[in-house]
Amino acid sequence: SPPQLQMPDEVVAEVASHGTVATAHDSLEDVIGETDVLYVTRVQKERFSDPEEYEALKLRYVVTPESLAEGNAKSSLVIMHPLPRVGEIDPRVDEDPRAAYFRQMENGMFV
């Protein structure tokens, strides 16, 4: 991810302290083929003080049917998202059996 969206160093350190290696990548295509679970979230506008920076980053990573095509992603991949989405998952992905976000939502707790 771009530096503005990377996991904080203290989170990476916490993960490492439990024996898990965290890696950062600039491209979904670089890692989609070895990914088991893809947990997608929206870029949160409210976390940016500069609206232009948000606009530049908000759709930097978009999951599309093309990015999930055979040969790119595992057939066993699970795609999750907390919903609502604002463009980070192409609606055409909803038809992909690997898309679990609506099932995920059904199993969530209503507040």
Image: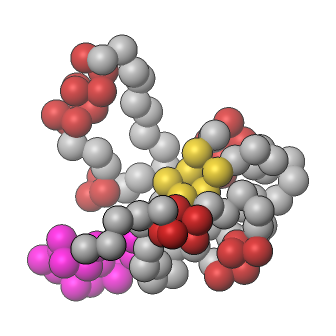
Q: Tell me, yes or no, if residue 33 can be seen here.
A: yes
Q: Quadrant of residue 93?
A: bottom right
- In the displayed structure, 86 sits above or below 77; it is below
Q: Residue at x 68, y 36 (%)?
A: 34
Which residue ends up furthest to the right in the rendered image? 70
Q: How is the model colour-coded?
A: secondary structure
Count of numbered circles on the image: 0
Residue 70 position within the rendered picture, expressed as x and y whole percent measured from the top left: 87, 53
Residue depicted at 76% across the width and 67% down the height: 96
Q: Position of residue 92 (x, y in %)?
A: 72, 80
59 w.r.t. 76: above or below: below
Q: Is residue 89 placed above or below 75 in the rendered structure?
A: below
- Whether 47 is among the magenta residues is yes
Q: Quadrant of residue 58?
A: bottom left
Q: Determine whether, in the image, residue 24 is placed left or right of residue 51.
A: right
Image quarter hosting the C terminus = bottom left
In percent of width and height, residue 104 lies at 52, 62
- Residue range in magenta is 41-59
Residue 101 in view here: no
